Amino acid sequence: MPNTGTLIVGAGHAGAQAAAALRQFGYEKPITLLTEETDPPYERPPLSKDYLARDKTFDAILLRPATFWASKNITLTLGQRAVAIDAAGHALHTADGTAIAYETLIWAAGGHARRLACTGHHLTGIHTIRTRADVDLMQAELAHTETVAVIGGGYIGLEAAAVLRKLGKSVVVIEMQDRVLARVAGPALSRFYEEEHRLHGVTLLLNTAVECIEERDGRAAGVRLANGTIIAADMIVVGVGIIPAVGPLREAGAAGANGIDVDEHCRTSLPDIYAIGDCAAHINPYAPAGQRIRLESVQNANDQAATAAKSIIAAATGAPAPHYDAVPWFWSNQYDLRLQTIGLSTGYDDTVLRGDPAARSFSLIYLRAGQVIALDCVNATRDYVQGKPLVVNRRIIDKALLADTAIPLKTHG
């Protein structure tokens, strides 16, 4: 069984950064980076934006140059799917029957795009946006596509809708909740983005459930809504979240309900096994007290990767292990709008509007018990940068002062 050092499952942001961080921090044992994809590590956020729009080539979204991995003595194992873990024996088994021994395992497999469960979910012409292969398949069909139905009004769905409008497609977004971005933002931001998409020609159907996918000649031809209406479409894009890819860990006995539970060092309940990135459920210091969450973000992937790498080295040297306490941040590009978020708005009880949405540059500041807990900044990078200390320090500031754009937020830091 090859490998006697660290085996990393998953080569997205979390896995790739964990491998690089181990070498950066002086780890000298073998490192194997194993992924079921056939491509070397690449960025996922551009898939629904620049890569879908063909504004960036695949080489432009590689996380590291092709020569990096060999230069750091990191073994890339592509096209291999992990199917079982022998936690007591410190071995992982792949779908082709290979067994790989490890001293330490980092599980960074992320998740798979959640698919529809209704009749017709299997038809050709239905797409998710999770991997390069997903987007390549979409692009191959776009030349023959005029109308697109996007199911899901979250980041992925709205980013795809913006790109597809840019490409001249007729787009309908179907969202079962009463507003877009309902899981991640307050109503004021939702209404702003709804208006923007409508101004760009997107049809938004809110409070709308999908009954099934219509078929014609063995291919998806439209979406039948719960009220019986049929939305004709040459292509259907599904953006309704991910399912954490944690099957082998669960079967091996790792604790966790929504993903895999980890402690402040990113350790799972199994010996010498860490979990990081989209699939890792952790108690975040910026979430309501005691709440265990998963964060699907580049920030979380990179920071947990560094925490796990340092913890592995600390375990070998006896040094104190670091705690994961990074402030969450996110971003989304739609049309000419750049949304930057700092903190977690979960559990907010008040908001402050800073700036004028009509000017297409403003911030929405979220408060909980008077404390600043998060900011959504639209084309307002200065607020985003200066607002971070307010979130980190849980500052309590008069709402009128927060709303006054003549007073820089750094004044309150």
Image (cartoon, rainbow, N blue to C red):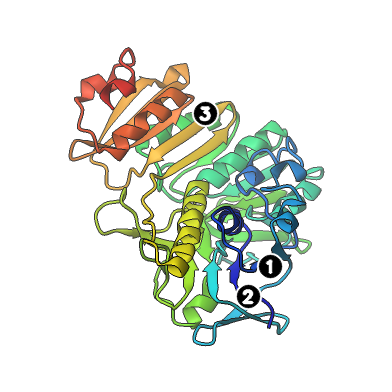
10 Å neighbourhood of mark 2: few (<14), some, or many (≥20)?
A: many
Which element is circle 1 on? loop
Question: Where is residue 371 shown, x and y percent of the image?
Answer: 22, 37
Q: Which residue is mark 3?
A: 196
Question: Where is residue 88 shown, x and y percent of the image?
Answer: 49, 87
Q: Residue at x 66, y 37 (%)?
A: 163
10 Å neighbourhood of mark 1: few (<14), some, or many (≥20)?
A: some
Q: Residue at x 63, y 75 (%)?
A: 82
Instruction: Report if the CB atoms under discs 1 and 2 are less than 8 Å apart.
Output: yes
Q: Quadrant of residue 45?
A: top right
Q: Which residue is mark 2?
A: 82
Q: Quadrant of residue 101?
A: bottom right
Which three-letter amino acid code belongs to the residue tagged 1? Glu
Which three-letter amino acid code belongs to the residue tagged 2? Ala
Q: Earlier in the sequence, mark 3 or mark 2?
A: 2
Which three-letter amino acid code belongs to the residue tagged 3? Glu
Q: Residue at x 62, y 42 (%)?
A: 160
10 Å neighbourhood of mark 3: few (<14), some, or many (≥20)?
A: some
Question: Where is residue 103 shown, x and y percent of the image?
Answer: 55, 76
Which element is circle 2 on? strand
In the image, residue 77 sits, relative to residue 288, either above or below, namely below
Residue 26 visible in the picture = yes
Given this view, does label 3 or label 1 mark the residue nearer the observer?
Answer: 1
From the viewer's perspective, is 382 left or right of 70?
left
In the image, residue 361 sits, relative to residue 347, either above or below, namely above
Q: Residue at x 21, y 28 (%)?
A: 397
Q: Which residue is mark 1?
A: 36
